[in-house]
Amino acid sequence: MRAYERFLKYVRYPTASSETTGRTPSTEGQRLLGQALAEELSSFGFEAECDALGYVYAVIPATPGCERAVPVGFISHMDTSPEFSGEGVVPKVTENYDGGDLVLGEGVVLRCADFPHLPSLKGQTLITASGGTLLGADDKAGVAEIMTLAERLAGGEIPHGKVCIGFTPDEEIGEGADHFDVARFGAVYAYTMDGDTVGGIEYENFNASSAEVEFHGFSVHPGSSKDTMVNASLAAMEFNALLPALDIPRHTDGYRGFIHLCSMEGDVCRARLQYILRDHSAELNRYREELLERAAGQINLKYGEGTVTVRMKEQYRNMAEIVKEHRHIIEKAEAACRKAGVKPFVAPIRGGTDGARLSFMGLPCPNLGTGGHAFHGPYEHITAESMDQATEVLVRLVAEYAAEAEGNE
Protein backbone atom coordinates (compact mmCIF):
# COMPACT_ATOMS: atom_id res chain seq x y z
CA MET A 1 0.00 0.00 0.00
CA ARG A 2 1.30 3.48 -0.85
CA ALA A 3 1.66 6.05 1.93
CA TYR A 4 -1.03 8.36 0.53
CA GLU A 5 -3.60 5.53 0.60
CA ARG A 6 -3.02 5.09 4.33
CA PHE A 7 -3.07 8.83 4.78
CA LEU A 8 -6.54 9.09 3.26
CA LYS A 9 -7.77 6.69 5.96
CA TYR A 10 -5.99 8.31 8.87
CA VAL A 11 -7.19 11.87 8.18
CA ARG A 12 -10.79 10.78 8.78
CA TYR A 13 -10.02 10.26 12.48
CA PRO A 14 -10.84 13.49 14.37
CA THR A 15 -7.69 13.93 16.45
CA ALA A 16 -7.42 17.64 17.26
CA SER A 17 -5.76 18.00 20.66
CA SER A 18 -7.21 20.22 23.39
CA GLU A 19 -5.61 22.38 26.07
CA THR A 20 -8.72 22.30 28.26
CA THR A 21 -9.50 18.63 29.01
CA GLY A 22 -6.62 18.05 31.42
CA ARG A 23 -6.07 14.44 30.40
CA THR A 24 -3.72 12.39 28.22
CA PRO A 25 -4.46 11.96 25.42
CA SER A 26 -6.40 15.18 25.52
CA THR A 27 -9.05 13.89 23.07
CA GLU A 28 -10.47 10.43 22.51
CA GLY A 29 -9.95 10.44 18.74
CA GLN A 30 -6.20 10.26 19.28
CA ARG A 31 -6.58 7.09 21.32
CA LEU A 32 -8.77 5.53 18.63
CA LEU A 33 -6.21 6.27 15.95
CA GLY A 34 -3.41 4.98 18.19
CA GLN A 35 -5.23 1.71 18.75
CA ALA A 36 -5.82 1.32 15.02
CA LEU A 37 -2.14 1.95 14.29
CA ALA A 38 -1.03 -0.58 16.91
CA GLU A 39 -3.37 -3.17 15.40
CA GLU A 40 -2.04 -2.46 11.91
CA LEU A 41 1.55 -2.79 13.09
CA SER A 42 0.69 -6.06 14.82
CA SER A 43 -0.81 -7.32 11.56
CA PHE A 44 2.63 -6.86 9.98
CA GLY A 45 3.99 -9.27 12.58
CA PHE A 46 5.60 -6.73 14.89
CA GLU A 47 5.33 -6.25 18.64
CA ALA A 48 3.17 -3.14 19.05
CA GLU A 49 1.01 -1.51 21.71
CA CYS A 50 -1.04 1.62 22.30
CA ASP A 51 -0.61 2.31 26.02
CA ALA A 52 -3.09 3.79 28.47
CA LEU A 53 -1.95 7.34 27.65
CA GLY A 54 -2.36 6.90 23.91
CA TYR A 55 1.33 6.47 23.01
CA VAL A 56 2.08 3.85 20.38
CA TYR A 57 5.31 1.85 20.58
CA ALA A 58 6.49 -0.82 18.15
CA VAL A 59 9.73 -2.69 17.52
CA ILE A 60 10.89 -4.15 14.23
CA PRO A 61 13.65 -6.69 15.01
CA ALA A 62 16.91 -6.58 13.07
CA THR A 63 17.29 -8.83 10.06
CA PRO A 64 19.91 -11.62 10.32
CA GLY A 65 23.41 -10.19 10.13
CA CYS A 66 22.35 -6.67 11.15
CA GLU A 67 21.87 -7.25 14.86
CA ARG A 68 24.86 -5.02 15.68
CA ALA A 69 23.42 -1.99 13.89
CA VAL A 70 22.63 0.99 16.08
CA PRO A 71 18.88 0.95 16.88
CA VAL A 72 17.18 3.83 15.08
CA GLY A 73 13.68 5.22 15.66
CA PHE A 74 11.02 7.12 13.77
CA ILE A 75 8.39 9.24 15.48
CA SER A 76 5.30 11.19 14.40
CA HIS A 77 2.41 12.73 16.29
CA MET A 78 -1.21 11.70 15.83
CA ASP A 79 -2.96 14.90 16.88
CA THR A 80 -3.85 17.82 14.65
CA SER A 81 -3.88 21.48 15.52
CA PRO A 82 -6.78 22.75 17.65
CA GLU A 83 -6.46 26.09 15.85
CA PHE A 84 -8.70 24.97 12.96
CA SER A 85 -11.42 22.35 12.66
CA GLY A 86 -10.32 18.76 12.11
CA GLU A 87 -13.82 17.31 12.43
CA GLY A 88 -15.34 15.60 9.43
CA VAL A 89 -12.30 15.85 7.18
CA VAL A 90 -13.18 14.88 3.61
CA PRO A 91 -9.96 14.66 1.61
CA LYS A 92 -10.06 15.86 -1.97
CA VAL A 93 -7.80 14.03 -4.44
CA THR A 94 -6.93 15.87 -7.66
CA GLU A 95 -5.13 13.59 -10.07
CA ASN A 96 -2.82 15.12 -12.67
CA TYR A 97 -3.06 18.51 -10.96
CA ASP A 98 -2.67 21.32 -13.53
CA GLY A 99 -0.46 23.50 -11.32
CA GLY A 100 -2.96 26.35 -11.09
CA ASP A 101 -5.50 27.76 -8.65
CA LEU A 102 -7.77 25.09 -7.19
CA VAL A 103 -11.24 25.56 -5.68
CA LEU A 104 -11.46 23.50 -2.50
CA GLY A 105 -15.01 24.36 -1.46
CA GLU A 106 -16.86 26.63 0.96
CA GLY A 107 -15.33 29.67 -0.73
CA VAL A 108 -11.76 28.51 -0.12
CA VAL A 109 -9.38 28.62 -3.09
CA LEU A 110 -5.81 27.30 -3.09
CA ARG A 111 -4.05 30.07 -5.04
CA CYS A 112 -0.64 30.16 -6.66
CA ALA A 113 -0.37 33.80 -5.58
CA ASP A 114 -0.40 32.64 -1.96
CA PHE A 115 1.64 29.46 -2.48
CA PRO A 116 4.18 30.05 -5.29
CA HIS A 117 5.44 26.45 -5.20
CA LEU A 118 2.13 25.08 -6.52
CA PRO A 119 3.13 25.13 -10.23
CA SER A 120 6.03 22.80 -9.34
CA LEU A 121 3.45 20.17 -8.35
CA LYS A 122 1.92 20.08 -11.83
CA GLY A 123 1.16 16.55 -13.00
CA GLN A 124 1.15 15.09 -9.49
CA THR A 125 -1.75 13.75 -7.43
CA LEU A 126 -2.63 16.63 -5.12
CA ILE A 127 -4.42 15.94 -1.84
CA THR A 128 -6.27 18.71 -0.01
CA ALA A 129 -9.21 19.08 2.35
CA SER A 130 -12.55 20.39 1.11
CA GLY A 131 -12.49 23.94 2.41
CA GLY A 132 -14.11 23.70 5.83
CA THR A 133 -11.43 21.79 7.72
CA LEU A 134 -7.71 21.31 7.83
CA LEU A 135 -6.36 18.21 6.09
CA GLY A 136 -4.25 16.70 8.86
CA ALA A 137 -0.97 16.33 6.97
CA ASP A 138 0.59 17.69 10.16
CA ASP A 139 1.30 15.03 11.16
CA LYS A 140 -0.68 12.15 9.73
CA ALA A 141 1.50 12.36 6.64
CA GLY A 142 4.45 11.42 8.84
CA VAL A 143 2.41 8.66 10.47
CA ALA A 144 1.45 7.21 7.07
CA GLU A 145 5.03 7.32 5.79
CA ILE A 146 6.39 5.55 8.86
CA MET A 147 3.64 2.94 8.64
CA THR A 148 4.48 2.34 5.00
CA LEU A 149 8.14 1.93 5.95
CA ALA A 150 7.06 -0.66 8.52
CA GLU A 151 5.09 -2.60 5.92
CA ARG A 152 8.05 -2.59 3.54
CA LEU A 153 10.36 -3.87 6.27
CA ALA A 154 7.89 -6.60 7.20
CA GLY A 155 8.91 -8.65 4.18
CA GLY A 156 12.45 -9.02 5.50
CA GLU A 157 13.95 -8.29 2.09
CA ILE A 158 15.52 -4.98 3.16
CA PRO A 159 18.48 -5.47 5.52
CA HIS A 160 18.09 -3.37 8.64
CA GLY A 161 18.99 -3.17 12.28
CA LYS A 162 16.48 -2.76 15.08
CA VAL A 163 13.90 -0.14 14.10
CA CYS A 164 11.73 1.52 16.73
CA ILE A 165 8.45 3.26 15.95
CA GLY A 166 6.63 5.75 18.15
CA PHE A 167 3.47 7.79 17.70
CA THR A 168 2.65 10.48 20.24
CA PRO A 169 -0.51 12.37 21.25
CA ASP A 170 -0.82 16.08 22.00
CA GLU A 171 2.29 17.39 20.24
CA GLU A 172 0.34 20.39 18.98
CA ILE A 173 -0.28 21.58 22.55
CA GLY A 174 3.34 21.01 23.57
CA GLU A 175 2.75 17.79 25.52
CA GLY A 176 3.84 15.11 23.05
CA ALA A 177 6.99 14.22 24.97
CA ASP A 178 5.45 14.52 28.44
CA HIS A 179 4.95 10.78 28.91
CA PHE A 180 7.21 9.39 26.19
CA ASP A 181 9.19 6.44 27.56
CA VAL A 182 12.62 6.74 25.93
CA ALA A 183 13.90 3.51 27.51
CA ARG A 184 10.87 1.57 26.35
CA PHE A 185 11.15 3.05 22.86
CA GLY A 186 14.58 1.46 22.58
CA ALA A 187 16.37 3.60 19.98
CA VAL A 188 19.75 5.28 20.35
CA TYR A 189 18.94 7.92 17.73
CA ALA A 190 15.63 8.89 16.19
CA TYR A 191 14.01 11.15 13.63
CA THR A 192 10.65 12.85 13.80
CA MET A 193 8.71 12.92 10.53
CA ASP A 194 7.09 16.31 11.10
CA GLY A 195 8.55 18.72 8.54
CA ASP A 196 7.25 20.01 5.24
CA THR A 197 9.27 19.80 1.99
CA VAL A 198 10.82 16.40 1.30
CA GLY A 199 14.57 16.58 1.73
CA GLY A 200 14.32 19.01 4.60
CA ILE A 201 16.52 18.12 7.57
CA GLU A 202 15.98 20.25 10.66
CA TYR A 203 17.93 20.23 13.88
CA GLU A 204 17.84 23.90 14.89
CA ASN A 205 14.55 24.94 16.40
CA PHE A 206 13.26 27.80 18.49
CA ASN A 207 13.74 28.08 22.20
CA ALA A 208 10.15 28.48 23.29
CA SER A 209 8.25 29.85 26.23
CA SER A 210 4.70 30.96 26.88
CA ALA A 211 3.37 33.82 28.94
CA GLU A 212 -0.03 34.31 30.49
CA VAL A 213 -0.56 37.92 31.49
CA GLU A 214 -3.50 38.77 33.77
CA PHE A 215 -4.84 42.24 34.52
CA HIS A 216 -6.95 43.21 37.53
CA GLY A 217 -9.00 46.38 37.19
CA PHE A 218 -10.93 48.56 39.60
CA SER A 219 -14.48 49.15 38.47
CA VAL A 220 -16.67 52.05 39.64
CA HIS A 221 -19.48 53.92 37.94
CA PRO A 222 -18.00 55.66 34.86
CA GLY A 223 -19.77 58.86 35.84
CA SER A 224 -17.74 59.17 39.02
CA SER A 225 -14.55 57.32 38.17
CA LYS A 226 -12.03 60.11 37.70
CA ASP A 227 -8.66 59.11 39.14
CA THR A 228 -10.30 55.95 40.49
CA MET A 229 -11.25 53.49 37.76
CA VAL A 230 -8.62 51.13 36.41
CA ASN A 231 -9.89 49.53 33.20
CA ALA A 232 -8.22 46.11 32.93
CA SER A 233 -8.78 45.92 29.17
CA LEU A 234 -7.19 49.32 28.59
CA ALA A 235 -4.27 48.35 30.83
CA ALA A 236 -3.82 45.25 28.67
CA MET A 237 -3.73 47.42 25.55
CA GLU A 238 -1.12 49.66 27.15
CA PHE A 239 0.93 46.62 28.11
CA ASN A 240 1.01 45.27 24.55
CA ALA A 241 1.90 48.74 23.24
CA LEU A 242 5.05 48.67 25.39
CA LEU A 243 6.36 45.66 23.42
CA PRO A 244 8.36 46.11 20.19
CA ALA A 245 5.87 46.48 17.34
CA LEU A 246 8.09 44.80 14.74
CA ASP A 247 8.99 41.84 16.94
CA ILE A 248 6.02 39.78 15.71
CA PRO A 249 5.67 36.83 13.30
CA ARG A 250 4.50 39.01 10.40
CA HIS A 251 7.81 40.87 10.35
CA THR A 252 10.29 38.09 11.14
CA ASP A 253 11.83 35.12 9.36
CA GLY A 254 14.94 32.93 9.36
CA TYR A 255 16.67 32.91 12.73
CA ARG A 256 14.89 35.99 14.07
CA GLY A 257 12.39 35.26 16.81
CA PHE A 258 9.25 37.01 17.94
CA ILE A 259 6.65 37.74 20.59
CA HIS A 260 3.27 36.48 19.39
CA LEU A 261 -0.02 37.57 20.96
CA CYS A 262 -2.14 34.42 20.64
CA SER A 263 -5.34 35.52 22.35
CA MET A 264 -6.92 38.33 24.34
CA GLU A 265 -10.06 38.67 26.39
CA GLY A 266 -11.37 40.97 29.06
CA ASP A 267 -13.61 43.66 30.46
CA VAL A 268 -13.18 46.48 32.96
CA CYS A 269 -12.52 44.19 35.91
CA ARG A 270 -10.30 41.52 34.40
CA ALA A 271 -8.35 40.93 31.21
CA ARG A 272 -5.97 38.29 29.96
CA LEU A 273 -3.35 38.16 27.20
CA GLN A 274 -1.63 34.97 26.10
CA TYR A 275 1.72 35.11 24.31
CA ILE A 276 4.29 32.72 22.94
CA LEU A 277 7.94 33.79 22.76
CA ARG A 278 10.39 32.25 20.31
CA ASP A 279 14.05 32.58 19.31
CA HIS A 280 16.85 30.27 18.19
CA SER A 281 19.06 32.01 20.74
CA ALA A 282 18.28 31.14 24.35
CA GLU A 283 19.72 34.49 25.43
CA LEU A 284 17.49 36.47 23.08
CA ASN A 285 14.43 34.51 24.15
CA ARG A 286 15.23 35.31 27.75
CA TYR A 287 15.53 38.96 26.73
CA ARG A 288 11.98 38.78 25.35
CA GLU A 289 10.79 37.38 28.66
CA GLU A 290 12.44 40.33 30.37
CA LEU A 291 10.62 42.73 28.03
CA LEU A 292 7.29 41.37 29.27
CA GLU A 293 8.42 41.59 32.87
CA ARG A 294 9.55 45.22 32.40
CA ALA A 295 6.25 46.12 30.72
CA ALA A 296 4.41 44.63 33.69
CA GLY A 297 6.55 46.69 36.02
CA GLN A 298 5.63 49.90 34.20
CA ILE A 299 1.91 49.10 34.31
CA ASN A 300 2.08 48.29 38.01
CA LEU A 301 4.01 51.47 38.67
CA LYS A 302 1.30 53.48 36.93
CA TYR A 303 -1.83 51.77 38.30
CA GLY A 304 -0.64 50.05 41.48
CA GLU A 305 1.12 46.84 42.39
CA GLY A 306 -0.86 43.74 41.46
CA THR A 307 -2.60 45.31 38.47
CA VAL A 308 -0.75 42.90 36.20
CA THR A 309 0.89 39.54 36.82
CA VAL A 310 2.99 37.56 34.32
CA ARG A 311 3.33 33.78 34.46
CA MET A 312 6.11 32.46 32.23
CA LYS A 313 6.60 28.81 31.27
CA GLU A 314 9.42 27.16 29.31
CA GLN A 315 8.02 24.95 26.53
CA TYR A 316 11.07 23.54 24.74
CA ARG A 317 14.69 24.32 23.86
CA ASN A 318 16.82 24.38 20.74
CA MET A 319 17.77 20.78 19.99
CA ALA A 320 20.93 21.95 18.16
CA GLU A 321 22.57 22.05 21.57
CA ILE A 322 22.33 18.24 21.63
CA VAL A 323 22.25 17.17 17.99
CA LYS A 324 25.40 19.07 16.99
CA GLU A 325 27.31 16.59 19.15
CA HIS A 326 26.04 13.77 16.91
CA ARG A 327 26.63 15.22 13.47
CA HIS A 328 26.67 11.76 11.89
CA ILE A 329 22.89 11.41 12.23
CA ILE A 330 22.48 14.49 10.02
CA GLU A 331 25.04 13.13 7.54
CA LYS A 332 23.14 9.84 7.33
CA ALA A 333 19.91 11.68 6.62
CA GLU A 334 21.63 13.68 3.87
CA ALA A 335 23.02 10.50 2.32
CA ALA A 336 19.61 8.82 2.49
CA CYS A 337 17.99 11.74 0.68
CA ARG A 338 20.54 11.66 -2.12
CA LYS A 339 20.14 7.90 -2.57
CA ALA A 340 16.36 8.39 -2.71
CA GLY A 341 16.80 10.92 -5.50
CA VAL A 342 15.93 13.86 -3.27
CA LYS A 343 18.09 16.96 -2.79
CA PRO A 344 18.78 17.37 0.94
CA PHE A 345 18.80 20.77 2.58
CA VAL A 346 19.29 21.84 6.17
CA ALA A 347 17.10 24.64 7.48
CA PRO A 348 16.14 26.00 10.90
CA ILE A 349 12.65 25.27 12.21
CA ARG A 350 10.57 28.30 13.03
CA GLY A 351 8.77 26.21 15.60
CA GLY A 352 9.42 22.97 17.42
CA THR A 353 8.76 19.25 17.35
CA ASP A 354 8.60 16.40 19.83
CA GLY A 355 12.25 15.87 18.92
CA ALA A 356 13.21 19.17 20.51
CA ARG A 357 12.28 17.84 23.93
CA LEU A 358 13.26 14.23 23.27
CA SER A 359 16.78 15.35 22.39
CA PHE A 360 17.13 16.71 25.93
CA MET A 361 15.65 13.45 27.28
CA GLY A 362 18.58 11.44 25.91
CA LEU A 363 17.27 10.70 22.41
CA PRO A 364 18.94 12.94 19.77
CA CYS A 365 16.11 13.48 17.34
CA PRO A 366 16.26 15.80 14.28
CA ASN A 367 13.25 16.35 12.02
CA LEU A 368 12.61 15.27 8.42
CA GLY A 369 10.25 16.57 5.74
CA THR A 370 7.00 14.75 4.97
CA GLY A 371 6.03 16.59 1.78
CA GLY A 372 3.18 18.60 3.30
CA HIS A 373 2.57 22.34 3.05
CA ALA A 374 0.43 25.10 4.64
CA PHE A 375 -0.21 23.27 7.89
CA HIS A 376 -2.86 24.22 10.47
CA GLY A 377 -5.51 25.55 8.12
CA PRO A 378 -7.83 24.87 5.17
CA TYR A 379 -5.01 25.28 2.62
CA GLU A 380 -3.05 22.25 3.80
CA HIS A 381 -1.90 20.12 0.88
CA ILE A 382 0.44 17.29 -0.05
CA THR A 383 1.01 15.05 -3.06
CA ALA A 384 1.02 11.29 -3.32
CA GLU A 385 4.38 11.46 -5.07
CA SER A 386 6.04 13.50 -2.32
CA MET A 387 4.82 10.96 0.24
CA ASP A 388 6.39 8.19 -1.83
CA GLN A 389 9.66 10.15 -1.83
CA ALA A 390 9.54 10.71 1.92
CA THR A 391 8.96 6.99 2.46
CA GLU A 392 11.89 6.13 0.23
CA VAL A 393 14.10 8.45 2.27
CA LEU A 394 13.16 6.44 5.37
CA VAL A 395 13.96 3.15 3.65
CA ARG A 396 17.34 4.49 2.58
CA LEU A 397 18.00 5.87 6.06
CA VAL A 398 17.40 2.46 7.63
CA ALA A 399 19.83 1.04 5.07
CA GLU A 400 22.46 3.63 6.07
CA TYR A 401 22.45 2.35 9.65
CA ALA A 402 22.54 -1.27 8.49
CA ALA A 403 25.48 -0.53 6.16
CA GLU A 404 27.40 1.08 9.01
CA ALA A 405 27.02 -2.12 11.03
CA GLU A 406 28.14 -4.28 8.11
CA GLY A 407 31.18 -2.05 7.62
CA ASN A 408 32.18 -2.62 11.24
CA GLU A 409 32.09 -6.40 11.01
Image (cartoon, rainbow, N blue to C red):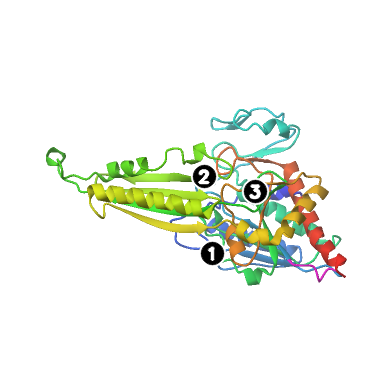
Label 1 environment density (alpha carbons within 10 Å; few <14, some 14–19, many ≥20) = some
Label 2 to label 1: alpha-carbon separation: 24 Å
Q: Which residue: 65% across, 46% down?
A: 347
Q: Which residue is mark 3?
A: 195
Q: Is residue 277 left or right of residue 128?
A: left
Label 3 to label 1: alpha-carbon separation: 21 Å
**Furthest residue in direction left, as rendered:** 224
Q: Identify the amino acid type marked 3.
A: Gly
Res. 316 in view: yes
Q: Which residue is mark 2?
A: 85
Q: Do the residues bearing badges 3 and 2 touch, measured as CB atoms within 8 Å?
A: no
- Range drawn in magenta: 66-71
Q: Which residue: 86% across, 66% down?
A: 406
| Quadrant showing the C terminus | bottom right
Q: Secondary structure at mark 1?
A: loop
Foreground label between 3 and 2: 3
Q: Do the residues bearing badges 3 and 1 touch, measured as CB atoms within 8 Å?
A: no
Q: Do the residues bearing badges 2 and 1 touch, measured as CB atoms within 8 Å?
A: no
Q: Which residue is mark 1?
A: 178
